[in-house]
Amino acid sequence: MRPTGRTTYTTQTLNRMKRHINLLTIALASLLIVIGCSESANESTTSDLEVSKTTSEAVNGEEKTVATIGIEGMTCEIGCAKFIEGKLSNMDGVLTATVNFEEQKASVEFDPAKTNEKDMVAAISGLADGIYKVNSVAVEAFVKDAPAKKATNSEKANNGKKEDSRGASENSHESVEAPVNIEFPNIFDAFRNLL
């Protein structure tokens, strides 16, 4: 018989090729899942975050300090939000921490004698090669004898902001410097663009 130009494969060869294709598909799918949580990493530079600080009357006499932190870069609830929540909860001085993926915010009750919002911003920004960015910080201190709302002469001289015993204003703003994140190109994006 003369060859017809067609290649024939044995059943064993075909099964081996199918196995290789299946393994390649599984590897590619796994790679895309791993990339999913880090895909939204953006370049960031040093920037000053405005920290809003307020003082309110304690509810039921319970004094506490709560920071509400806006976080960018979360792409999934379990892999991102729960990861950040776990890291914040394990910080010294943090009493409770919850991260709401839908609102892209963390609510952290903490002891200001042991930690502060700057430590929390640094902790979040340092996670997962810096893909999470803090975009806002608001700290509210609930104290037992909150200052009265009646303006005093010192408040009028301070543009209507009442000072507490530490010299901080009742409604004050501070700046927190966000850490510099240097980001290198993601080689997986190049592979994905080839597909």
Image (spheres, grey):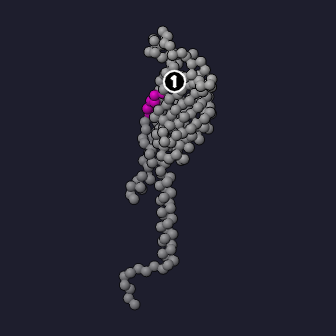
Question: Furthest-front residue in view?
Answer: 60
Question: Which quarter of the rendering shows the C terminus?
Answer: bottom left
Total marks in image = 1
Q: Which residue is mark 1?
A: 54
Question: Which quarter of the rendering shows the N terminus?
Answer: bottom left
Residue 75 in picture, x, y percent from top left: 48, 46
Residue at image position (50%, 61%) is: 26
Residue 146 or 40: which is nearer the viewer?
146
Estimate how packed mark 1 is, as few (under 14), some (14 to 19) or many (20 or more) residues with alpha carbons within 10 Å. some
Q: Amino acid at mark 1?
A: Thr
Residue 174 in picture, x, y percent from top left: 48, 24
Question: Furthest-bottom residue in view?
Answer: 1
Reply above or below: 21 against 67. Answer: below
Residue at image position (48%, 71%) is: 17
Residue 13 in picture, x, y percent from top left: 49, 76
Reply above or below: 29 against 82. Answer: below
In this rendering, does residue 167 appear at all?
Answer: no
Residue 103 or 90: which is nearer the viewer?
103
Residue at image position (51%, 77%) is: 12
The majority secondary structure of the magenta stretch comes to: strand
In reply to whether residue 97 is colored magenta, the answer given is no
Residue at image position (53%, 47%) is: 79
Question: Furthest-left residue in view?
Answer: 5
Q: Which residues are magenta?
A: 46-51
Mark 1 secondary-structure assignment: strand
In this rendering, does residue 24 appear at all?
Answer: yes
Residue 186 in picture, x, y percent from top left: 44, 49
